[in-house]
Amino acid sequence: MRKQILAWSLGLVFIAASCTAQAEVSAEHHRSAIVSLPKLATTVASWEHIFRTTFDPRILAHYCLATAVYFEARSEPQLGQLAVATVIVNRAMTSTYPSSICGVIYQGAHRRDACQFSFACDGRSDLPQDDRAWETALAVAARALAKERKQLILPSATHFHADNVNPSWSRSLRRVTKIGRHIFYSQG
């Protein structure tokens, strides 16, 4: 949810900055300027585009999923990153978890260190710092969200953890495989 608010806020800040810049037109220029309808229509269309793309669920899902891939698996090869993304997509498709990608990722994020994905509630910034890793995460997220589900690996996996921890919940699930430093599980 925090990421959704951040994405919305960034869009609204952009709009506010545009409004402020337009409001700072000097009084003399304002008096001599004639507002043309085509210019006004273009401005309205621009704002409509900003609102539509800022609140588009597909864009939010892509951004949230890329952020999760970046923070949970950026040091993994692309196969490992795709496996992490697949777990998140699989969760969003079950009735046990929230139905949106962002909802799955930020479930429980309001509780410090008690959420589904550690980066979401660790108190650190969720803004990517490594541009190359971010570009890879965006590409992996796009692939995971593509309509062609045949390209996804681990079609039943709903859980994973790093191989350096042994969470209690892992004993109640069926281990599917290990890819890179992550172990993947399914619920059946």
Image: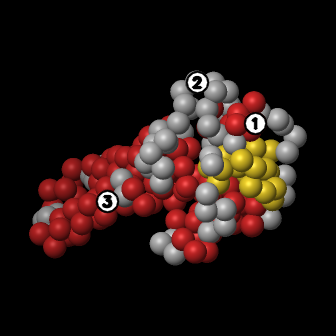
The answer to whether mark 1 and mark 2 are in CB contact below 8 A is: no
Helix, strand or loop under label 1 = helix
- Amino acid at circle 2: Arg
Mark nearer the viewer, 1 or 2: 1
User: Residue at 36% across / 53% down in the picture?
Assistant: 55
Mark nearer the viewer, 3 or 1: 1
Graded by Cα atoms within 10 Å as few (under 14), some (14 to 19) or many (20 or more), the crowding at tag 2 reads few
Q: Which mark is residue 52?
A: 3
Residue 83 picture quarter = bottom right
Residue 53 picture quarter = bottom left
Q: Which mark is residue 171?
A: 1
Residue indicated by mark 2: 111
Pick the residue in front: 66 or 6: 66
Graded by Cα atoms within 10 Å as few (under 14), some (14 to 19) or many (20 or more), the crowding at tag 1 reads few
Residue 10 horizontal/vertical position (percent) = 45, 47
Whichever of callouts 2 and 3 sits on the residue coming sooner in the sequence is: 3
Mark nearer the viewer, 2 or 3: 2
Whichever of callouts 1 and 2 sits on the residue coming sooner in the sequence is: 2
Spatial distance from mark 1 to mark 2, Cα to Cα?
A: 24 Å
The answer to whether mark 3 and mark 1 are in CB contact below 8 A is: no
